[in-house]
Amino acid sequence: MGHLGVIINTRARELVSPKAVWYGFTILTTNKHVYITLNWLLHYIPASIVDSALFLTGSKLRLLKIYKKVKSLTSVLSYFLLNDWKFEDENTLSLYNSLSSTDKVLFNFDMSLVDNTELIIMWTLGLRRYIIKDDLNNTEYGIKKQFWLKIVHYILTALYLYLIFKLFRFVFSIFNLLINV
């Protein structure tokens, strides 16, 4: 992640919603197979485990429902997320450069003047207010909640990876036994 990404990540974490159900993190990949594998490992399997535990306790199932929404959204966006894009804007630059000083003020579309950090902050606040329907006054609680979710996330991720490792080792040992018979 570049310098701008670190700044945006830090600022966005200061605006986290108290409605978050887990510690938010991102793994970037352009490989479709890695993406599908990570989707299963980080979304579907944990959601199934948690929903199974909720079912056993008689609670309402919720994570698979959320996962299906995430899957639906990412499947719509996957073409754009999994490909590199290069946009040519010579005509736009030429048009902007041909404007008079007055027109440049009236019809300002100089993208070099856009503050990407401010753009992400406004996007985050808009997402919280209009999509999540969140009260923006609970941010302090959201930050504290994310601190504890981060600790739980790292502990459970280590345990989860250990269990996956043990499972693969077990399957591999059975596979070796079957081959050697």
Image: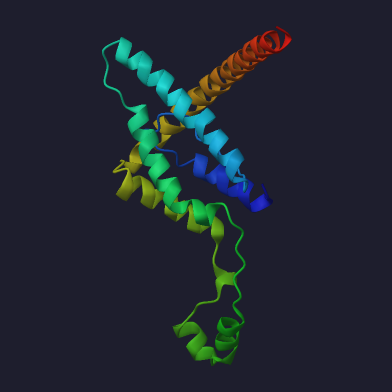
Residue 130 as seen in the image, left or right of residue 96:
left
**Residue 20 seen:** yes
Picture quadrant where residue 62 is located? top left
Q: Position of residue 72 (x, y in %)?
A: 38, 44
Q: Residue at x 33, y 32 (%)?
A: 65
Q: Nearer the viewer, residue 98 or 166?
A: 166
Q: Residue furthest front?
A: 181
Q: Is residue 90 above or below residue 81?
A: below
Picture quadrant where residue 48 is located? top left
Q: Residue at x 32, y 47 (%)?
A: 131
Q: Residue at x 62, y 45 (%)?
A: 29
Q: Residue furthest right?
A: 180
Picture quadrant where residue 90 is located? bottom right
**Residue 19 seen:** no
Q: Is residue 160 above or below residue 126?
A: above
Q: Nearer the viewer, residue 97 or 48?
A: 48
Q: Nearer the viewer, residue 67 or 31?
A: 31
Q: Position of residue 97 (x, y in %)?
A: 60, 88
Q: Position of residue 146 (x, y in %)?
A: 48, 29
Residue 112 as seen in the image, left or right of residue 132:
right
Quadrant of the snapshot with the C terminus:
top right
Q: Residue at x 51, y 31 (%)?
A: 40
Residue 63 as seen in the image, left or right of residue 5:
left
Q: Is residue 4 above or below residue 54?
A: below
Q: Position of residue 100 (x, y in %)?
A: 54, 93
